[in-house]
Image (spheres, grey):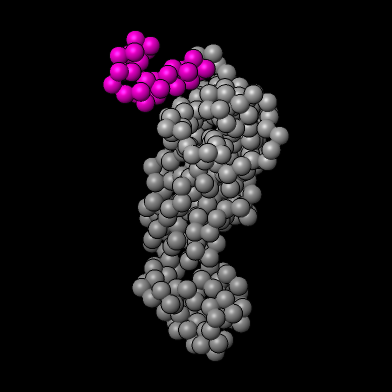
């Protein structure tokens, strides 16, 4: 490295300096320094305050050139760089230089970010959300023996004393963002399997799931069983009810076990399938089944109750079901749910 620096020094002083900075951080990484030591060394090299922050823990480390914590409040960063691990941004590093940036600041921050990611991975737990899909699949697969599952969970950061809930997700949002929101203070890992996202978390707060995300939540009675439950719950989600807990499905979960051909042959389900050609009628039936009340359905649809009444009369004739009778409402609700499960079965992993 030094021989190369000597050869380059006659051509480009900046190149020599850059190589010396790289060698400096290579030495720090070989010595396995932690984050505070990295900040102190970087501040001494840059001759200004250096800092780093980890998003997952919120921890901030700053050091002045003399190696001590700065006595001043953080100044605006003159230069910054992202710290990434497993293609996920986990933090930021920066310099608080009062004057103009040094020509080598960019190289210094780049190597500091790499060294910080290495330290986080080594001393962990690594606060990344995205995980190796093969490892996640091993943790939730029915075919995994308990020893293999336990090892996979340990590698993912879940200790033996932690419960593990599994969430099946469909969303255009990045899984790491959903996972970080879902379980901000405890272990959480995510991966994409087929067309479904999988999130493993020590605890799940459904209220933190962002809008536009469909999520099925399994119970915390073992990752394998929880994954099966989460997939089933995901099939019951709708635009009106985008998050479903398996534990709250009760006997409705039995509908997911009925063979699709049996469901298709049912007259009520076939009638709902024909009704699906009219999104307006389908939305009206959904609102009425969800509320069980003409007036509450009208409020939900933002329509006058007389308009909803006329629609429901037409829908009842089309279905051949008396919707105003309790038994008829149950038939319509079951048929609508079963028809939706047929569609969701085509997207199940």
Residue for point 63% across, 32% down: 62
The one of 249 and 112 positioned closer to us in this rendering: 112
> For residue 20: magenta?
yes
Say left or right for 70 vs 91. Answer: right
Question: What is the chief secondary structure element of the magenta stretch?
Answer: helix
Residue 273 in view (yes/no):
yes
Residue for point 49% across, 59% down: 212
Residue 164 in view (yes/no):
no
Expressed as whole percent of the image width and height from the top left, the position of residue 96 reads 57, 37
- In the rendered view, tell whether residue 28 sits above or below residue 339: above
* Extreme-top residue of the structure: 3
Say left or right for 36 vs 193. Answer: right
Expressed as whole percent of the image width and height from the top left, the position of residue 43 reads 57, 27
Q: Quadrant of the C terminus?
A: top left
Q: Quadrant of residue 193?
A: top left
> For residue 261: magenta?
no
Residue for point 49% across, 34% down: 83
Please provide the residue range marked out in magenta: 1-29
Expressed as whole percent of the image width and height from the top left, the position of residue 347 reads 39, 51
* Extreme-bottom residue of the structure: 306
């Amino acid at each position: 490295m030094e021989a190369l620096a000597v050869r380059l020094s006659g051509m480009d002083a900046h190149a020599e300096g850059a190589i010396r900075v790289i060698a400096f951080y290579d030495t720090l990484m070989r010595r396995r320094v932690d984050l505070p030591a990295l900040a102190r060394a970087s501040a001494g090299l840059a001759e200004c305050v250096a800092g780093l922050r980890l998003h997952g823990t919120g921890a901030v480390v700053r050091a002045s050139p003399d190696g001590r914590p700065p006595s001043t409040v953080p100044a605006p960063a003159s230069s910054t760089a992202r710290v990434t691990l497993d293609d996920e941004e986990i933090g930021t590093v920066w310099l608080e230089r009062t004057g103009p940036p040094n020509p080598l600041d960019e190289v210094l921050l780049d190597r500091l970010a790499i060294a910080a990611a290495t330290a986080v991975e080594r001393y962990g737990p690594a606060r990344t959300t995205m995980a190796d899909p093969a490892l996640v699949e091993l943790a939730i697969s029915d075919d995994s023996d308990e020893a293999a599952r336990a090892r996979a969970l340990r590698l993912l950061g879940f200790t033996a004393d932690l419960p593990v809930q599994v969430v099946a997700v469909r969303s255009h949002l990045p899984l790491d963002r959903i996972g970080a929101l879902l379980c901000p203070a405890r272990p959480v890992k995510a991966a994409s399997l087929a067309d479904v996202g999988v999130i493993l978390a020590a605890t799940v707060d459904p209220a933190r799931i962002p809008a536009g995300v469909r999520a099925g939540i399994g119970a915390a009675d073992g990752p394998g069983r929880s994954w099966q439950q989460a997939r089933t719950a995901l099939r019951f989600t709708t635009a009106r009810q985008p998050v479903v807990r398996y534990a709250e499905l009760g006997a409705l979960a039995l509908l997911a076990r009925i063979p699709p051909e049996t469901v298709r042959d049912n007259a009520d389900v076939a009638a709902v399938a024909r009704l699906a050609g009219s999104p307006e009628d389908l939305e009206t039936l959904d609102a009425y089944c969800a509320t069980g009340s003409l007036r509450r359905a009208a409020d939900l649809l933002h329509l006058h109750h007389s308009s909803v009444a006329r629609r429901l009369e037409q829908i009842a004739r089309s279905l051949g079901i008396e919707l105003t009778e309790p038994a008829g409402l149950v038939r319509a609700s079951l048929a609508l749910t079963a028809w939706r499960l047929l569609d969701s079965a085509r997207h199940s992993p």
